[in-house]
């Protein structure tokens, strides 16, 4: 009994200590509350950010949709505007970026000449500005431009319309840009642009040329009758209001290089590799076609090639495209060049050949040469 009575106060004390512990504030509760508050702040911030991103996307999409709707409204009512209003709307289309390209291209075929010319200028300016963009954006704008231009080119049926000149110029620009952006040559848009470029506009014949053609036609009908070659006579080509192609001309006009002829003496050219060199008129004999007469036909005369000394090395490089540089006569002619570099090259080439004509030319030029280094070079070749 004594032991039991003594243990009760100890038990009660233990219970009291536990109660006091529960009533005592937790020393770590401040840190726990701080963590909970941080989590609540992070969650609320994330909600606000998500809401801001969603709202930004909605506003951006709305602006894009509104801008495209305004551009569509401008394009649909463009034809009803005055010239000044159309020019103002072109500026808005230019500021609209890639979405404004179709509207500007469509304005190229506008009935107002000022609007057509202005739209062509804007497209050329935009093409120059696009080269500063990344490759993917550059290609996107170029292909949109080419597709729209190929589409509107079919709206013009009169190739003498001044607007057709703008279309052809822009087609050349668009075709070049397509190739630069990696377009295939068999692309449908590129082929359409090349068809636009290939269309040639024949200028109308002036009254004097038409009178000359009429007189020539009457004289031809009286002497030889109508030409039987379909599509190759000068009369049929002139009646079609087209220039005279050299490859389709008859024998009487095969030597002419311009049509209609501006003088009685045409300019004749000798064709070489890359260019056309004019021939002296003294070597050309023009006469009316006549029946062959064995006693009147002169013997064929072989014309020797004529070379000119190059003034500079650049001129000599151009001559090598059109002249026979393997000929000894060419290098002998270069000894008379005012450039010491050209003369030195000619001396070296003739010295390598070492034939009688080359050595004789070097001996004759040795007395006229004023450059001591070239004289020494000539002397070294002659002493071998």
Image: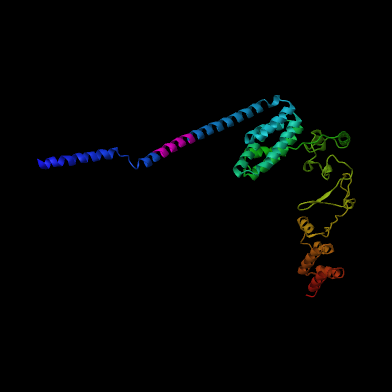
Residue at image x 76%, y 55%?
321
- Quadrant where the C terminus lies? bottom right
Left or right of 135 in this view: 170: right
- Above or below, 67 against 26 in this view is above
Q: Position of residue 163 (x, y in %)?
A: 74, 33
Q: Position of residue 100 (x, y in %)?
A: 65, 33
Instruction: Using the image as rendered, state which of residue 145 and residue 206 is in the foreground.
Output: 145
- Above or below, 213 against 254 in this view is above
Q: Residue furthest left?
A: 1
Q: Residue furthest top?
A: 80
Most frequent secondary structure within the magenta stretch: helix
The type of colouring in the image is: rainbow
Q: Position of residue 293 (x, y in %)?
A: 88, 48
Instruction: Using the image as rendered, state which of residue 335 and residue 238 is in the foreground.
Output: 335
Residue at image x 81%, y 33%?
239
* Residue 41 among magenta residues: yes
Instruction: Using the image as rendered, state which of residue 241 and residue 153 is in the foreground.
Output: 153
Q: Is residue 59 visible?
A: yes
Left or right of 380 in this view: 62: left
- Residue span colored magenta: 36-49
Left or right of 72 in this view: 197: right
* Residue 34 among magenta residues: no
Q: Is residue 155 visible?
A: no
Name the quadrant containing residue 131.
top right
Name the quadrant containing residue 194.
top right
- Above or below, 381 against 112 in this view is below
Instruction: Using the image as rendered, state which of residue 15 and residue 322 is in the foreground.
Output: 15
- Quadrant where the N terminus lies? top left
Q: Position of residue 69 (x, y in %)?
A: 61, 28
């Amino acid at each position: 009994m004594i032991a039991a009575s003594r243990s009760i106060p100890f038990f009660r004390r233990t219970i009291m200590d536990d109660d006091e512990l529960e009533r005592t504030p937790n020393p770590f509760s401040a840190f726990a509350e701080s963590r909970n508050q941080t989590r609540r702040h992070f969650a609320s911030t994330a909600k606000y950010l998500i809401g801001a991103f969603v709202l930004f996307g909605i506003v951006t999409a709305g602006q894009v949709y509104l801008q495209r709707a305004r551009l569509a409204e401008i394009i649909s009512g463009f034809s009803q505007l005055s010239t000044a209003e159309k020019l103002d709307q072109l500026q808005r289309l230019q500021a609209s970026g890639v979405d404004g390209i179709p509207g500007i291209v469509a304005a190229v075929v506008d009935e107002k000449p000022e609007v057509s010319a202005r739209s062509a200028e804007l497209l050329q300016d935009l093409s120059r500005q696009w080269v500063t963009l990344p490759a993917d954006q550059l290609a996107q704008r170029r292909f949109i431009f080419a597709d729209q231009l190929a589409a509107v080119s079919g709206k013009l049926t009169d190739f003498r319309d001044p607007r057709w000149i703008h279309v052809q110029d822009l087609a050349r620009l668009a075709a070049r840009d397509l190739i630069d952006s990696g377009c295939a040559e068999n692309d449908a848009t590129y082929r359409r642009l090349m068809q636009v470029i290939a269309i040639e506009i024949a200028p109308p014949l002036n009254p004097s040329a038409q009178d000359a053609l009429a007189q020539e036609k009457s004289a031809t009908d009286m002497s030889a009758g109508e030409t039987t070659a379909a599509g190759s006579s000068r009369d049929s080509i002139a009646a079609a209001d087209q220039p005279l192609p050299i490859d389709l001309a008859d024998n009487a006009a095969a030597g002419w290089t311009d049509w209609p002829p501006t003088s009685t003496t045409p300019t004749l050219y000798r064709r070489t590799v890359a260019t056309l060199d004019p021939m002296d008129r003294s070597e050309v004999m023009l006469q009316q076609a006549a029946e062959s007469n064995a006693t009147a036909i002169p013997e064929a005369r072989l014309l020797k090639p004529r070379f000119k000394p190059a003034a500079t090395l650049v001129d000599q490089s151009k001559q090598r495209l059109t002249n026979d540089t393997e000929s000894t006569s060419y290098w002998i002619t270069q000894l008379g060049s005012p450039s010491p570099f050209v003369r030195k090259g000619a001396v070296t080439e003739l010295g390598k050949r070492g034939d009688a004509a080359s050595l004789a030319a070097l001996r004759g030029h040795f007395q006229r040469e004023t450059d001591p280094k070239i004289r020494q070079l000539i002397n070294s070749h002659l002493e071998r």
